[in-house]
Protein backbone atom coordinates (compact mmCIF):
# COMPACT_ATOMS: atom_id res chain seq x y z
CA UNK A 1 0.00 0.00 0.00
CA UNK A 2 2.81 2.42 0.84
CA UNK A 3 4.55 1.71 -2.51
CA UNK A 4 1.31 2.32 -4.44
CA UNK A 5 0.80 5.70 -2.68
CA UNK A 6 4.43 6.61 -3.39
CA UNK A 7 4.02 5.72 -7.08
CA UNK A 8 0.82 7.81 -7.27
CA UNK A 9 2.60 10.78 -5.58
CA UNK A 10 5.51 10.53 -8.03
CA UNK A 11 3.12 10.34 -10.99
CA UNK A 12 1.23 13.39 -9.69
CA UNK A 13 4.51 15.30 -9.20
CA UNK A 14 5.58 14.44 -12.75
CA UNK A 15 2.24 15.68 -14.07
CA UNK A 16 2.60 18.98 -12.16
CA UNK A 17 6.21 19.34 -13.34
CA UNK A 18 5.13 18.85 -16.96
CA UNK A 19 2.29 21.39 -16.62
CA UNK A 20 4.61 23.89 -14.89
CA UNK A 21 7.29 23.39 -17.57
CA UNK A 22 4.82 23.95 -20.40
CA UNK A 23 3.45 27.09 -18.72
CA UNK A 24 6.96 28.42 -18.03
CA UNK A 25 8.18 27.77 -21.59
CA UNK A 26 5.04 29.43 -22.98
CA UNK A 27 5.73 32.53 -20.91
CA UNK A 28 9.33 32.63 -22.09
CA UNK A 29 8.11 32.33 -25.68
CA UNK A 30 5.67 35.21 -25.22
CA UNK A 31 8.34 37.38 -23.60
CA UNK A 32 10.84 36.55 -26.35
CA UNK A 33 8.31 37.32 -29.05
CA UNK A 34 7.43 40.63 -27.43
CA UNK A 35 11.06 41.76 -27.15
CA UNK A 36 12.25 40.33 -30.46
CA UNK A 37 10.01 42.56 -32.61
CA UNK A 38 11.93 44.48 -35.25
CA UNK A 39 12.32 48.19 -34.68
CA UNK A 40 10.87 50.36 -37.47
CA UNK A 41 13.20 50.85 -40.43
CA UNK A 42 13.52 53.87 -42.70
CA UNK A 43 11.17 53.68 -45.68
CA UNK A 44 11.05 57.14 -47.27
CA UNK A 45 11.51 60.85 -46.72
CA UNK A 46 9.04 63.33 -48.22
CA UNK A 47 10.04 66.89 -49.05
CA UNK A 48 7.66 69.69 -49.97
CA UNK A 49 9.33 71.62 -52.80
CA UNK A 50 8.69 74.92 -54.58
CA UNK A 51 10.10 74.11 -58.04
CA UNK A 52 9.65 70.44 -58.93
CA UNK A 53 11.81 70.61 -62.05
CA UNK A 54 14.79 72.10 -60.17
CA UNK A 55 14.40 69.60 -57.34
CA UNK A 56 14.17 66.58 -59.65
CA UNK A 57 17.22 67.77 -61.58
CA UNK A 58 19.18 68.23 -58.34
CA UNK A 59 18.34 64.83 -56.91
CA UNK A 60 18.86 62.98 -60.19
CA UNK A 61 22.01 64.75 -61.39
CA UNK A 62 23.70 65.89 -58.18
CA UNK A 63 22.65 63.17 -55.75
CA UNK A 64 22.46 60.53 -58.52
CA UNK A 65 19.13 59.11 -57.32
CA UNK A 66 17.15 57.06 -59.84
CA UNK A 67 13.48 57.90 -60.55
CA UNK A 68 10.73 55.43 -59.67
CA UNK A 69 7.25 55.09 -61.11
CA UNK A 70 4.54 56.80 -59.05
CA UNK A 71 2.34 53.91 -57.89
CA UNK A 72 -0.61 56.19 -57.07
CA UNK A 73 -1.00 57.99 -60.41
CA UNK A 74 -3.01 60.71 -58.71
CA UNK A 75 -3.50 64.42 -59.35
CA UNK A 76 -0.89 65.54 -56.81
CA UNK A 77 2.45 66.25 -58.44
CA UNK A 78 4.70 63.74 -56.74
CA UNK A 79 8.07 62.36 -57.84
CA UNK A 80 9.60 59.26 -56.29
CA UNK A 81 13.34 58.58 -56.27
CA UNK A 82 15.32 55.55 -55.11
CA UNK A 83 17.81 56.53 -52.37
CA UNK A 84 18.86 53.08 -51.22
CA UNK A 85 18.02 49.43 -51.53
CA UNK A 86 14.80 49.84 -49.56
CA UNK A 87 14.49 53.62 -49.17
CA UNK A 88 12.99 56.40 -51.25
CA UNK A 89 12.71 60.16 -51.49
CA UNK A 90 9.30 61.61 -52.35
CA UNK A 91 9.22 65.14 -53.75
CA UNK A 92 5.87 66.87 -53.38
CA UNK A 93 5.21 69.99 -55.44
CA UNK A 94 3.46 73.05 -54.04
CA UNK A 95 5.62 74.85 -51.48
CA UNK A 96 5.01 78.61 -51.64
CA UNK A 97 8.44 79.71 -50.45
CA UNK A 98 11.97 78.48 -49.72
CA UNK A 99 12.74 79.20 -46.07
CA UNK A 100 16.15 79.21 -44.43
CA UNK A 101 16.82 75.89 -42.72
CA UNK A 102 19.12 74.96 -39.84
CA UNK A 103 21.96 72.56 -40.65
CA UNK A 104 21.08 70.59 -37.51
CA UNK A 105 17.94 69.45 -39.35
CA UNK A 106 19.39 67.28 -42.09
CA UNK A 107 19.26 63.80 -43.54
CA UNK A 108 22.38 61.81 -44.40
CA UNK A 109 23.56 59.50 -47.15
CA UNK A 110 26.74 57.44 -47.30
CA UNK A 111 28.95 57.07 -50.37
CA UNK A 112 31.75 54.58 -50.99
CA UNK A 113 34.25 57.32 -51.90
CA UNK A 114 33.67 60.77 -50.42
CA UNK A 115 36.55 62.36 -52.38
CA UNK A 116 35.07 61.14 -55.68
CA UNK A 117 31.66 62.50 -54.67
CA UNK A 118 33.21 65.86 -53.77
CA UNK A 119 34.85 65.93 -57.22
CA UNK A 120 31.41 65.24 -58.74
CA UNK A 121 29.97 68.16 -56.73
CA UNK A 122 32.81 70.43 -57.92
CA UNK A 123 32.10 69.44 -61.54
CA UNK A 124 28.40 70.25 -60.99
CA UNK A 125 29.34 73.60 -59.30
CA UNK A 126 27.52 72.62 -56.12
CA UNK A 127 28.50 74.41 -52.93
CA UNK A 128 29.38 72.08 -50.02
CA UNK A 129 31.47 72.12 -46.88
CA UNK A 130 31.90 70.90 -43.36
CA UNK A 131 29.68 71.89 -40.45
CA UNK A 132 31.59 75.17 -40.12
CA UNK A 133 31.20 76.02 -43.81
CA UNK A 134 34.79 75.30 -44.90
CA UNK A 135 35.06 73.55 -48.28
CA UNK A 136 36.57 70.39 -46.83
CA UNK A 137 35.25 67.34 -45.04
CA UNK A 138 35.28 67.04 -41.30
CA UNK A 139 36.05 63.85 -39.44
CA UNK A 140 33.71 62.62 -36.75
CA UNK A 141 35.12 61.04 -33.58
CA UNK A 142 34.36 57.58 -35.08
CA UNK A 143 36.56 58.35 -38.11
CA UNK A 144 33.73 58.93 -40.61
CA UNK A 145 34.31 61.90 -42.93
CA UNK A 146 31.33 64.09 -43.82
CA UNK A 147 30.27 67.15 -45.80
CA UNK A 148 27.02 69.12 -46.02
CA UNK A 149 25.17 70.67 -48.93
CA UNK A 150 21.72 72.12 -49.58
CA UNK A 151 19.14 71.29 -52.21
CA UNK A 152 17.18 73.97 -54.13
CA UNK A 153 14.69 74.24 -51.24
CA UNK A 154 17.48 74.71 -48.67
CA UNK A 155 17.03 71.23 -47.16
CA UNK A 156 20.37 70.21 -45.64
CA UNK A 157 21.97 66.95 -46.74
CA UNK A 158 24.95 65.26 -45.13
CA UNK A 159 27.08 62.99 -47.30
CA UNK A 160 29.59 60.78 -45.52
CA UNK A 161 31.81 57.76 -46.03
CA UNK A 162 30.35 55.60 -43.25
CA UNK A 163 30.82 51.91 -44.01
CA UNK A 164 28.33 50.59 -41.42
Image (spheres, rainbow, N blue to C red):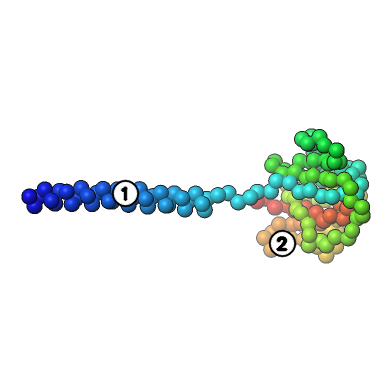
As rendered, which of 79 and 137 lies closer to the eye? 79
Judge whether residue 60 can be spotted in this image: no
| Spot occupied by residue 94 in the image (x, y as percentages of width and height) | 89, 48
Residue occupying the far left of the picture = 1
Q: What is the secondary structure assignment of the residue under circle 2?
A: loop
- Image point (87%, 45%), residue name: 93
As rendered, which of 12 and 107 lies closer to the eye? 12
| Spot occupied by residue 121 in the image (x, y as percentages of width and height) | 86, 49
Is 94 placed left or right of 86 in the picture?
Answer: right
Q: What is the secondary structure assignment of the residue under circle 1?
A: helix
Count of picture labels: 2
| Spot occupied by residue 101 in the image (x, y as percentages of width and height) | 85, 60
Rounded to the nearest whole Å, what is the CA distance between mark 1 and mark 2? Answer: 56 Å
Q: Where 85 sits versus 106, above or below? A: above
Q: Are marks 1 and 2 in contact (CB under 8 Å)?
A: no
Is 30 placed left or right of 63 in the picture?
Answer: left
Label number found at residue 71: none
- Camera-nearest label, 1 or 2: 1
- Neighbour tally class for label 1: few under 14, some 14-19, many 20 plus, Cα within 10 Å: few
Is 27 placed left or right of 126 in the picture?
Answer: left
Where residue 133 sits, quadrant-wise, is: bottom right
Label number found at residue 19: 1
- Image point (73%, 52%), residue name: 161
Label number found at residue 140: 2
- Image point (14%, 51%), residue name: 6
As rendered, which of 118 and 1 lies closer to the eye? 1
Judge whether residue 133 can be spotted in this image: yes
- Image point (37%, 50%), residue name: 23
| Spot occupied by residue 124 in the image (x, y as percentages of width and height) | 90, 46
Q: Reading the chain from its start, which is encountered first: label 1 or label 2?
A: 1
Amino acid sequence: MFIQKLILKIALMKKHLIIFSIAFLSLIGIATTATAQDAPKADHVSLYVKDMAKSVEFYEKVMLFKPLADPFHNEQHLVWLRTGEHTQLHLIDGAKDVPERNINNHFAYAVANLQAFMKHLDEMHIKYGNYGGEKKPQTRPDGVKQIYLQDPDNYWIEVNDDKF
